[in-house]
Amino acid sequence: MFCTEIDLQPLDNPVERDYLRLQLSPGMRKTPTYGLTHLAVTVTDLGRTRDFYCAVFDMEVMYDDPGFLQLTTPGCHDILVFEPGPAKKAGEVGGIAHFGFRLREAGEMGKMREKILKAGGVIQDEGEFVPGSPYIFFKDPDGYVVEVWYEMLG
């Protein structure tokens, strides 16, 4: 059962109401997938990568084998796959400029900034796309550019 326009009216927060309207629009209901749910990247040190992403994003280990590492964000359908490879490949962006993690609340940005720095991330840029929508771009230990942002909907 999907929410209808009538079901959305009792929500006091217009941002939440608009978010639900977008998520439950007829076009969103037609896809049989959860959308883009994983990305595989080459890293030089699986242990260091595990420690970094678990510390910054509270990710959990799904698989930790010598040939690959899979992490997931609790409560989400995402998987980050890390595969060991030569240093010359790790951190290369190729056709992907960055990947990102979207915050649930804008007020969490300060805490994320502290976690990024404490874990060894290097902040490249930070600010607001528009008032109330903060972002941070940083490099992880292998040099990949990662974004943390909050997006106001509506």
Image: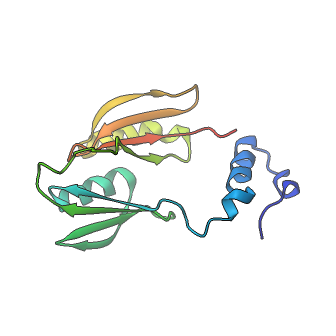
Total of numbered circles in the picture? Answer: 0
Q: Name which quarter of the figure residue 83 lies in.
A: bottom left
Q: Name which quarter of the figure residue 53 lies in.
A: bottom left
Colour scheme: rainbow
Rendered view: 81 above or below 64: above
Residue at 45% over, 26% down: 127
Q: Is residue 138 left or right of residue 102?
A: left
| Residue 90 percent location from the top left of the image | 18, 50
State the residue lying farthest toward the front: 95
Q: Is residue 131 left or right of residue 114?
A: right
| Residue 66 percent location from the top left of the image | 16, 72
| Residue 63 percent location from the top left of the image | 30, 73
**One can see residue 87 in this view:** yes
Q: Is residue 151 left or right of residue 142?
A: right
| Residue 134 percent location from the top left of the image | 50, 32
Rendered view: 81 above or below 121: below
- Image quadrant containing the N terminus: bottom right
Residue at 27% over, 44% down: 93
Residue at 43% over, 42% down: 148
- Image quadrant containing the C terminus: top right
**One can see residue 24 in this view:** no
Residue at 55% over, 33% down: 133
| Camera-side residue of 100 and 48 | 100
State the residue lying farthest toward the right: 6
